[in-house]
Amino acid sequence: MAEGEEVENKQVILKHYVRGSPKESDMEIRTGKTKLKLPEGSSGAIVVKNLYLSCDPYMRNRMSKVEGSYVESFTPGSPIVGYGVAEVLDSSHQNYKKGDLVWGMTTWEEYSVITSTEGLFKIQHTDVPLSYYTGILGMPGMTAYVGFFEVCSPKKGERVFISAASGAVGQLVGQIAKLFGCYVVGSAGSKEKVDLLKNKFGFDEAFNYKEEADLNVALKRYFPDGIDIYFENVGGKMLDAVLLNMTPYGRIAACGMISQYNLEQPEGVQNLFCLVTKQIRMEGFLVFDYYHLYPKFLEMILPQIKEGKITYVEDIAEGLENAPSALIGLFSGRNIGKQLVAVTRG
Amino acid sequence: MAEGEEVENKQVILKHYVRGSPKESDMEIRTGKTKLKLPEGSSGAIVVKNLYLSCDPYMRNRMSKVEGSYVESFTPGSPIVGYGVAEVLDSSHQNYKKGDLVWGMTTWEEYSVITSTEGLFKIQHTDVPLSYYTGILGMPGMTAYVGFFEVCSPKKGERVFISAASGAVGQLVGQIAKLFGCYVVGSAGSKEKVDLLKNKFGFDEAFNYKEEADLNVALKRYFPDGIDIYFENVGGKMLDAVLLNMTPYGRIAACGMISQYNLEQPEGVQNLFCLVTKQIRMEGFLVFDYYHLYPKFLEMILPQIKEGKITYVEDIAEGLENAPSALIGLFSGRNIGKQLVAVTRG
């Protein structure tokens, strides 16, 4: 391909801000043009070919018009941005060269020019599936790691409950908690996911929250002596039931509240007085503060993956055309495991 | 009075478990008999004359039948128990002698035999009002101190909001936060209380929450740059509004939620997702865990009181007959400052 030649560039565009549940029709596929070479005189930028794009629950917030939030809203009419794995095609940045693989913030399109490279990580280990860098070896993996070890202050033998437990983050939290020596129970939204939790990820117990008439009763069944640590991914009614079942000095790592993201008015949580009576610490966290721990995390997790002690289930949508459907599927729990999009398999 | 002679002993009896708002008629005054001398062969016990009894919001929970709570329910048909200041009349305990003054758990009656003395503190400093040991120098004072310094992790210059700010705990939190170098705003439920906060306790600002149509707007007025620390005494709608106004990495010390205690069904709190997006730590605490810090607390607070740098407002009901009314007045906010009962002024 000649230098400066334009190529077609398929993109996933957010058509407008979303209220309530996002639909496929809130997005559209558009084909633009881009150059695969940086212009003369460029510096500090790279051109990448996007290989895998990550569908993450936090992206729901970016689809709405929000002010003063922890993440910026997407721009209607422009492509969606998110985590991905990409190959460097051209570089005017001293740290990157053609052929490098990176993960970090990119754009939902075939090719991207990245001028803010601060949030990128160069991929050093390629003897694992590259797609893992959208999941277990990327942002969700780090989220599980720091949420559990840095926020939950776990002790061996403690009883850990994880909601949305088969998701990108939950499946790893459960496995590292088990390896650490905890009793681990997860909830998920289908029989298939519950089977995964018990049979593939080695959770001690798991249940389908949709089949439980009373979440409080369900939790008491699996935690007759209470929950020491709750890794919170869903919010709402589950949080209310968990609060009733926490032990004194319990810890709640508030990672996400996916059950609430599409509601115009969030559900009210009624049992917060339990925080006082049980001296519970509930702490929200964002992974962005902890990326300095990434090398330590890799050192821990890579051998576990290679030795088969930790496994990871992905749900891969093929092609950008299927990206909108993959993203909105997160909110109905359609995905089994980490949802991502393979932009190209070539 | 001859040894072993019986005297009349007025008591405040809880007639039955309470649901919803407690009423004076849930309690009754009964006059029994007691001896002011311990029987021969007694050991480890004391007989006390109760001087001051403390009315504290947590007592509401003890008036209901609750199981597995952090405090035991009161026993219907028996007198109420609570914090108080008392004088030792007789002792078979090596640490106490006649004439000693103590504060700690006692019973709502004129004279009590205390056989569990573990929770008692001997009063060493009597150059301050004795009644202060039900408030600023007792459980509420320690609650303010440990809640602020141990739970809130304050830094000089931070912006602190306190609800129920003229109450037994709130008025002290505000004053120590000011002395520590924070910007301090409190909410209370009447003009008189707001005046106290601003003019007597030296809060930077204060407002009457009952006169605010929108608590979110009110908080934005006093905290245009957000709240770093929230000392939570009320729960419910105020907590929801505060969550919207917290700064990133804010801390919420959950001390109590008095607005919820009389509700059959607590109000739902909707804005908990703010915990995630702002990386807020919300932590419940009970003062019981921190009593080892009491000597350190006294060392800090006594000079401040004597030098007039910290002041304390009490609302004193005279006589056991007025104790039921004083206790239930807490829940409508009738008291101005720390509510207590002077059993006797003789």
Image (cartoon, coloured by chain):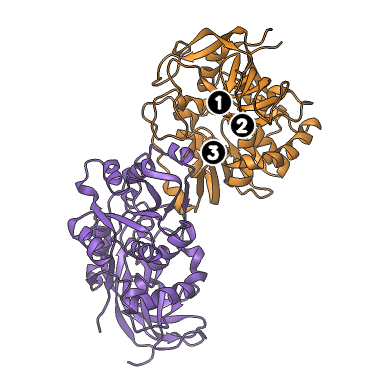
Chain colours: A orange, B purple
Tell me, yes or no, if residue A336 can be seen here: no
Do dots 3 and 2 share one subunit? yes
Residue with the mark numbered 1? A56
**Secondary structure of residue under mark 1:** loop
Q: Residues within 10 Å of mark 2 (few under 14, many from 20)?
A: many
Q: Residues within 10 Å of mark 3 (few under 14, many from 20)?
A: some
Where, quadrant-wise, is the N terminus of chain A in this rendering? Answer: top right
Q: Which mark is residue A286?
A: 3
Chain designation of label 3: A
Between marks 3 and 2, how big is the CA–CA gap?
11 Å
Is disc 1 in contact with disc 2, using a CB cutoff of under 8 Å? Answer: yes
Q: In the rendered structure, which disc, 1 or 2, sits on the residue that comes first in sequence?
A: 1
Chain designation of label 1: A
Chain designation of label 2: A
Where, quadrant-wise, is the C terminus of chain A in this rendering? Answer: top right
Between marks 1 and 2, how big is the CA–CA gap?
8 Å
Is disc 3 in contact with disc 2, using a CB cutoff of under 8 Å? Answer: no
Residue for point 50% across, 50% down = A280
* Residue B334 on image: x %, y %: 21, 59
In the current view of this chain or complex, which residue is farthest to the bottom? B2
Residue type at mark 1: give it: Asp
Residue type at mark 3: give it: Leu
- Pick the residue in front: A44 or B299: A44
